[in-house]
Each structure stands twice: as structure tokens, then as C-alpha cells.
Image (cartoon, helix red, strand yellow):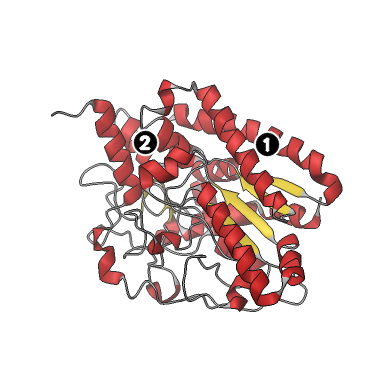
């Protein structure tokens, strides 16, 4: 039975995120090797721990430990990571949660919560609950990707809290959570895959209604973290989705020549981000008396600046991935048989969806004043 154009697109988008990981079992032993290289928090650090929730932009390896094809634990992922080992991070190196933890002297790398080898010391300074392929919409993570939904990530955080209380006591646990930085980064999969890639949500929601639907989930998620003791929360907005190489590949009239951003998708991100900032502002105002700070992290404009002036940031390519063909040809995947560019730091994107470590570093340092403001309660 022939598939419709819409279903073919849905399957293609799903494979984009999965990234051909059937060879993952070859590395089932090596991936589990812990390369956490932890360091104790510096005495002057204003951050007790770092906790990350969301999708592949923050997943430091949780998908390695669940039954999903959406994994990044095979070469050439991790090409520029410690010892060049793929850990489940969807990039050539570190992600923003790692950069945050290192910058504030918490530890060098943020480990995935599902790593069975975590020690109590690892737990006390924070972990990642993110899962590649996830989204705020429950359909995105569970039914499409079979990864950790945002709700499941919250359940694991509650489990983490009880686990830490048993190890170090309720008072110490409460102080760690109160003094921690919480980072939430999600939403792209909801729009690119779930809403525009599949027909189900579009049958029930207009684009405006779906943005409101996602924002309601953002607020509920944030509220739950506040109820669990979080006091400093950074919520990352959407990147210019129309500038993702995979979106250009599918939607450009001539993807071999016309590599410009697709405005339809970038405008969705801008509108969503405007609404997100407004809702977060309202939420923070209502909880300010409790010492709560909820900050918006503007990744959109950070990425746009890199695209408009790539050479200012040392980039030579901002519209195709370092790993894979970068255009259409064989696939959008990044796997052991893919072409890999000689120097990933010259590329904004590592594969057709995810930034390089260099790009993440640029974004992090551009948003450092925002993170500082959240931690200082400004």
C-alpha cells in the first residue's frame, strides 16, 4: 500500500532524529564507561547543583539506558569529547549543561541520571534528566520517539530527591535543590516533528492554539519544579527552527543552491518565544516573594547572529552539518559511515539538527549575563 506524501514526510522526520543507530549495540560496553571527570564545587560557587530537563540539546546520555532508537552513543558523535568517546550527547563534544556546570565550578560534566554507576557525590552536584526526542507535548516523547517524556523526567526528579534524602538527609537535600540552577530546554520536536511533521495535532489545533497548548505544559512543568523546591529556573526558548539544515533540506525549492532559512518555521519560533517570555514574566512575578527567579534564555537571536555574521565567530559553514552529507543524498543521519568534516569548530551544526560544541559555547557565553542574573536574583 503506497504511503501518502504526508506519511512519507513523517517517517523521514522521525529518521532524522533517530540518526541511524542500529550499530549502537556494538558499543554497549564502551558507552557505559563513565567519563564524568567530576570536580568538587568551588568554595565560592553560587550554584549548589545543576539540573537539566528537556530534549537532545541537554541529554547527556539518558537515552543510552532506555529502549529507544534515538541514541547518540555511536561514532562519530563525541568526536571531540574526552577521549573521543560517544556518550549519548548529540554533538561532537559538550552540551550547554556541561558548560554551565563547569563555568560555575560545580563539576566538569553533567552526568545522565540513568547512569547506574552514579555515586552519591555525583548526585549531590546535579544530574541531567533530559531525553533526546522529547518534548512538552506528551505525544512527542512517548508515542513518536519512545523516549522520556517531560512528565517522566519529573518523575525521575522526584525519585532523585527521595534517593538523595536517604543518602544525605532531608535538610541537606532541600538546601541543594534550593541553591541549584534548573535548566529546561525543549519544544523544537513538538513543532518540527509532532505538529508540522505529523497530522494528528494539526487536526485539532491551529498554530496559535498549539503554541498555547505547549505553553500550558511549560507552565505546569515549571510549577511542578517550584513545588519540589526549585528556586532558580532558566527556560530556554526555541532556536530559529527554519535555519536547521534538515528543515532547509526538506522545504527549500533547491536545497543544493538555496540554503537560506525557511521563514515559516522561524516565525513560529519567534511568536512562541514572545509568548513564552510574557508567561514566564507573569509566573515569576507571582512567586517573587518566595525568592523565585525564572529567566528566559534567548537562544534564537544568539543563533541568528552566528548565521548573519559567521566569520565573526570563526564559522565557515552555517547551513549544513559537519557530519553527514549536509544536503539530501543518502540520508540526514550521522553515523559511522558518514562523511565528517576535518574541523567541526568551523561549523555551526554538527549534524542536520544539532549544533557543534563550538556553537553551543558561543550561545552559552552570549547568554551568560542571563544565567548570572537568574543566579543573582536580578
Question: Visible in this render: residue 366?
Answer: yes
Labels 2, 1: front one: 1
Q: Nearer the viewer, residue 370 or 128?
A: 128
Above or below — where is 18 with respect to 213?
below
Residue 311 is left or right of residue 334, and the answer is right
Quarter of the view holding residue 98: bottom right
Q: Nearer the viewer, residue 134 or 257?
A: 134
Q: Which of 26 and 178 is in front in this view?
A: 178
Q: Position of residue 108 (x, y in %)?
A: 58, 72
Comes first in the chain, label 2 or label 1: 2
Above or below — where is 43 with respect to 87?
below
Above or below — where is 162 with respect to 16?
below
Above or below — where is 346 with respect to 330?
below
Q: Which mark is residue 277?
A: 1
Query: Dot 2: within a 10 Å radius of its alpha carbon, few (fewer than 14), some, or many (20 or more) residues?
Result: many
Question: Visible in this render: residue 260?
Answer: no
Q: Residue sitting at 31 percent across and 47 percent down?
A: 326
Residue 221 is left or right of residue 289, and the answer is left
The answer to the question of whether label 2 and label 1 lie on touching residues, with beta carbons closer than 8 A, is: no
Secondary element at tag 1: helix
Q: Residue sitting at 68 percent across and 55 percent down?
A: 368
Quarter of the view holding residue 46: bottom right
Q: Residue sitting at 50 percent across and 24 percent down?
A: 207
Q: Which residue lies furthest to the left in this view?
A: 1
Query: Dot 1: within a 10 Å radius of its alpha carbon, few (fewer than 14), some, or many (20 or more) residues?
Result: some
Q: Where is residue 122 in the image (x, y as percent from the top left)?
A: 58, 74
Q: Which residue bears the numbered disc 2?
A: 248
Q: Position of residue 84 (x, y in %)?
A: 38, 72
Residue 364 is left or right of residue 352, and the answer is right
Secondary element at tag 2: helix
Q: Which mark is residue 79?
A: none
Amino acid at each position: 500500500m503506497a504511503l501518502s506524501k504526508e506519511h512519507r514526510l513523517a517517517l523521514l522526520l522521525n529518521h532524522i532524529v533517530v540518526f541511524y543507530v542500529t550499530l549502537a549495540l556494538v558499543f554497549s560496553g564502551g558507552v557505559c564507561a563513565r567519563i564524568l571527570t567530576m570536580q568538587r564545587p568551588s568554595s565560592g560557587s553560587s550554584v549548589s547543583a545543576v539540573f537539566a530537563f528537556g530534549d537532545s540539546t541537554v541529554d547527556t546520555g539518558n537515552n543510552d539506558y532506555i529502549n529507544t532508537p534515538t541514541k547518540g552513543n555511536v561514532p562519530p558523535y563525541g568526536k571531540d569529547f574526552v577521549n573521543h568517546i560517544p556518550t549519548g550527547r548529540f554533538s561532537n563534544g559538550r552540551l550547554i549543561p556541561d558548560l554551565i556546570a563547569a563555568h560555575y565550578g560545580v563539576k566538569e560534566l553533567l552526568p545522565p541520571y540513568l547512569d547506574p554507576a552514579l555515586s552519591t557525590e555525583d548526585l549531590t552536584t546535579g544530574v541531567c534528566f533530559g531525553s533526546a526526542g522529547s518534548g512538552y507535548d506528551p505525544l512527542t516523547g512517548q508515542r513518536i520517539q519512545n523516549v522520556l517524556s517531560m512528565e517522566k523526567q519529573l518523575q525521575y526528579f522526584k525519585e532523585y530527591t527521595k534517593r538523595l534524602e536517604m543518602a544525605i538527609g532531608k535538610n541537606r537535600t532541600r538546601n541543594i535543590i534550593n541553591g541549584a540552577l534548573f535548566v529546561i530546554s525543549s519544544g523544537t520536536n513538538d513543532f518540527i516533528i509532532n505538529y508540522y511533521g505529523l497530522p494528528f495535532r494539526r487536526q485539532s489545533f491551529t498554530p496559535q492554539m498549539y503554541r498555547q497548548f505547549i505553553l500550558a505544559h511549560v507552565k505546569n512543568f515549571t510549577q511542578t519544579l517550584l513545588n519540589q523546591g526549585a528556586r532558580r529556573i532558566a527556560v530556554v526558548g526555541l532556536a530559529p527552527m527554519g535555519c536547521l539544515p534538515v528543515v532547509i533540506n526538506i522545504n527549500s525549492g533547491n536545497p543544493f543552491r538555496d540554503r537560506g532559512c525557511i521563514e515559516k518555521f522561524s516565525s513560529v519560533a519567534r511568536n512562541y518565544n514572545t509568548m513564552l517570555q510574557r508567561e514566564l514574566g507573569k509566573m515569576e512575578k507571582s512567586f517573587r516573594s518566595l525568592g523565585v527567579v525564572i529567566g528566559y534564555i534567548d537562544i534564537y537571536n544568539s543563533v541568528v547572529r552566528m548565521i548573519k555574521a559567521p566569520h565573526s565567530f570563526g564559522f565557515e559553514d552555517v547551513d549544513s552539518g559537519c557530519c553527514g552529507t549536509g544536503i539530501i543524498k543518502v540520508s540526514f543521519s550521522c553515523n559511522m559511515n558518514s562523511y565528517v568534516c576535518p574541523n567541526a569548530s568551523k561549523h555551526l551544526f554538527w549534524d542536520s539538527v544539532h549544533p557543534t560544541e563550538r556553537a553551543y559555547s558561543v550561545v552559552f557565553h552570549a547568554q551568560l549575563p542571563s544565567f548570572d542574573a537568574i543566579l543573582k536574583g536580578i
